[in-house]
Image (spheres, rainbow, N blue to C red):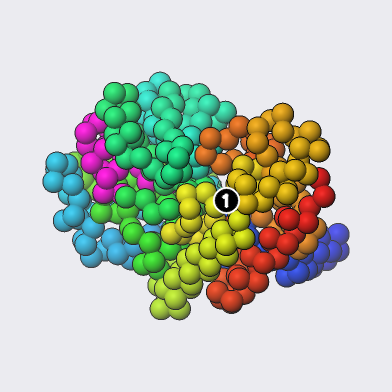
Amino acid sequence: MKDLQIKKLIDAEKKRQKSVINLIASENYCSADSLEALGSVFDNKYAEGYPGARYYGGNQVVDQLELLAQERAIKLFGLDKGEHVEKFSDKNPHKSKWHVNVQPWSGANANLAVYLGLAPIGSKIMGMALTSGGHLSHAQKVSITGKVWEPVTYIVDPETEVLDYDYVEELAKSEKPAIIVAGFTAYPREVDWKRFRKIADEAGALLMVDMSHLAGLIAGKAYPSPFPYADVVTTTTHKTLRGPRGAMIFSRIDSRELYKKIDKAVFPGLQGGPHESQIAGIAVALKEATDAKFKSYAKQVIKNAKVLASELQKRGWHVVADGTDSHMVLVDTWMNGEKVSEIAARSIKHGEMALGAGGIPGKVAELELEKAGIICNKNTVPGEKRSPFDPSGIRLGTPAETTRGKKEADFKKIAEKIDKVLKGIKI
Ligand code: DSN
């Protein structure tokens, strides 16, 4: 590369990535082949429209690429075999095959496109609260998704910190949202997709699952698939799925023609030209994820997260929802209970008690862990009393380090190190 300033920064970031323990639950390392496709000549091409119906000439090769990416996505999640047709709710007559749009530039865009296509402006969208593990694009007030549509927000059970489906059902039945969003950004436990289908049917709503965090685990058959039950499934491609950044929207092909409305919402509704180089990189990752090795990877991700959670619990840390069934572990470092009362004592000295009980603010935990070479993110926790900029906990994830070959024994050591760093914090 001739641009030495940029080359220096790329090398510095490579060095940083290699030298840290990366526990950001939403990050991963995509393959060299994916990166090669991402940096390819496909980036030079304008291809507004869809295969066979573009607004520019010269799209013969790009059309083949996009169709191949779609075919691989459908195959990876078993949607080519019709196995996700029969199980679809008896109440819902829309038994169908699936279509996938591979053009969304990002996950938030993909979610926005679904709402734009399927929910009348001003209608209700029901999503989980940010503090319970929902995402900004699940109709939160600070996002366009909660300004253009009316947000209906559900939370987890304050005691157990897991979903209370009866309460979600009651809320859905009384609010009658156009769309119910399931699938979360900081919820570690298994989700009962079938129950969500029932809730959507009872409320007369569409069920959209945002499986961004779980896509790789679902592709690797290590976590239950939402496809038998959802009307629409959105996902990013760069988290557990281990591709380059991007997103996809799966929708049923049936008399409701949801897929046509979604395609129109993506383009021309929200986006211009698709990033075909991004689509090429995603296509590579989709093929890699069909490999048997990827199945072992997905299982290992979860095994590692379970070890991380239990090792932290053993040392007295409050793990949200009492553990994990996925790739992530949420630790409430602030409301951490009596077992780490010495930490609370330090916080009292620091004057933090005014804000609640208290241990370590998530922001402090994130910074101190980073100083020790462990990268994670501060995160809100159920019943959050502090602010999203300085919340009560941290979110830890195992996908990136599992890609680097780490197993249970390594995560035991990582838990020991986290414990040591956090308990040694001088506030
Ligand atoms: N920022 C992603 C995450 O970390 O979960 C979601 O957009």
Say whether residue 48 is left or right of residue 357.
left
Residue under the image location 36 percent in, 50 percent down: 191
Q: Nearer the viewer, residue 293 or 343?
A: 343
Q: Visible in this render: residue 260?
A: no
The residue most toward the top is 122
Q: Which residue is mark 1?
A: 318
Measured as percent of width and height from the top left, residue 313 is found at 56, 58
Measured as percent of width and height from the top left, residue 222 is found at 39, 66
As for residue 46 lying within the magenta part, the answer is no
Say whether residue 80 is left or right of residue 25.
left
As for residue 202 lying within the magenta part, the answer is yes
Image position of 299 with respect to 164: above or below:
below
Measured as percent of width and height from the top left, residue 259 is found at 31, 44
**Quarter that holds the N terminus:** bottom right
Residue under the image location 78 percent in, 56 percent down: 424
**Quarter that holds the C terminus:** top right
Chain part drawn in magenta: 193-210
> Which secondary structure is most common in the magenta stretch?
helix
